[in-house]
Amino acid sequence: MTLDALQARGGWQLLAAPEERAAGEAALALAAGQLPAGAGLVLGSGGSSGGRRWCLQPWSQLEASAAACGQWLSAQGFQLSGLTVVNPLPGHHMSGLMPQLRARAWGADLVNLSPAQLKQPADLLELQAGWRQPLALSLVPTQLQRLLAHPSGLAWLQRFELIWLGGAGLSVELAERARQARLRLAPCYGATETAAMVCALEPDRFLAGVVGCGHPFADCQLRLGSQGAIELRTLRLSPGWLQDGALVPFAGLSLWWRSGDGGRLTDQGLEVLGRLDGAINSGGETVFPEQVEQRLLALAASASLPLAALLVLGEVDALWGQRLVGLFRPLPGAGDPAATAQLAASLQGLARQLPPSHRPQRWLACPELAPSELGKWQRGQWVRWLASQ
């Protein structure tokens, strides 16, 4: 169903993947008498623990998000109605919904790509020939990495004037590869709860070597709370999520929402460190596994290790409180027992370059290790896998 058709139906409409529709419909039915007045969408939102929240977003707030993003673009000299917005992300996620709403609000052209199309880089160049310039694209890091690995994918990316990158952290190694290729990335930060991005780094600043996600949009405020938690205040914060037949608000009377992500604010803007619920305390030091992963991935790439995926988790340790354990998946063709053992030993050796609290104490091969379709790690799932071992 198109966005116009959904909006015309009025009330609260569910937007969900086919496999989640039954759960979403049940949550909506249970809370039928508690829904606020107005109209909008109900979308699934999940954090690193793998839990699912059915989050309400009024149409007015989704449209306000598109307007704030347009204001950010206009300040950089873009003519909004002259853009072609390219969207390869699933429409039942906020990240795939918003490109459609932005294009509609701006009067821009919209091109939706399927996941299968994005995996055929040679065909993308031919498709692109008929699109109006300039081009704006939304990606997650996993998609960026795949495209960078293919000459046609790289050539395709180089034709974009703007590439928003969100959904997961951008590793130092991947950022440097993108800069070397002169890709105009705009790393951004946001959530379903905030109707997508609340800040983004301008491509010129990214290419100049600035790290992080830039400064907040005009309609958003950022601050750091206890434990360095990123807190946000914006009028487009969701009114709440559905739980056991009730609508649970995201923010109290102060209207500040604690996101669950740890970060720091600098003169250059926001830097996201990782999920607080995934952080571990090792020997009295707070360690963000995402930061360790980025460093290890950069070291592995420099050493040309046959590594397809890497994830760092915490486990109980009698002396340190918690210690890190590393999960990894070898590249195809490098998964026989001898090669796997050698890869584990190489990763253990590279980890010696990190501070003691950041070094995984053991490494486990996991043939099925992979992030979600949006490039996010469902850490709760892999914690359970680790426990089963």
Image: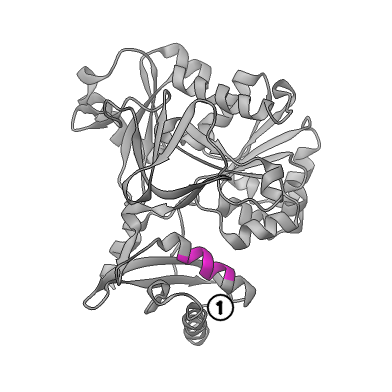
* Residue 1 appears in view: no
Residue 273 position (above or below residue 255): below
Looking at the image, residue 379 sits to the left or right of residue 122; the answer is: left
Closer to us: 34 or 112: 34
Q: Which residue is mark 1?
A: 334
Looking at the rendered structure, the secondary structure element under dot 1 is: loop
Q: Which stretch is magenta? A: 292-298
Residue 12 part of the magenta-drawn span: no
Residue 364 lies in quadrant: bottom left
Residue 296 part of the magenta-drawn span: yes
Please, what is the three-letter code of the amino acid marked with disc 1? Ala
The majority secondary structure of the magenta stretch comes to: helix
The image shows residue 137 at horizontal and vertical percentages of 65, 39
| Display coloring | one colour
The image shows residue 174 at horizontal and vertical percentages of 62, 59
Residue 211 position (above or below residue 221): below
Dot 1: few (<14), some (14–19), or many (≥20) neighbours within 10 Å?
some
Closer to us: 342 or 230: 230
Residue 202 lies in quadrant: top right
Residue 251 lies in quadrant: top left
Looking at the image, residue 287 sits to the left or right of residue 212; the answer is: left
Looking at the image, residue 147 sits to the left or right of residue 323; the answer is: right
Looking at the image, residue 317 sits to the left or right of residue 176; the answer is: left
The image shows residue 358 at horizontal and vertical percentages of 41, 71
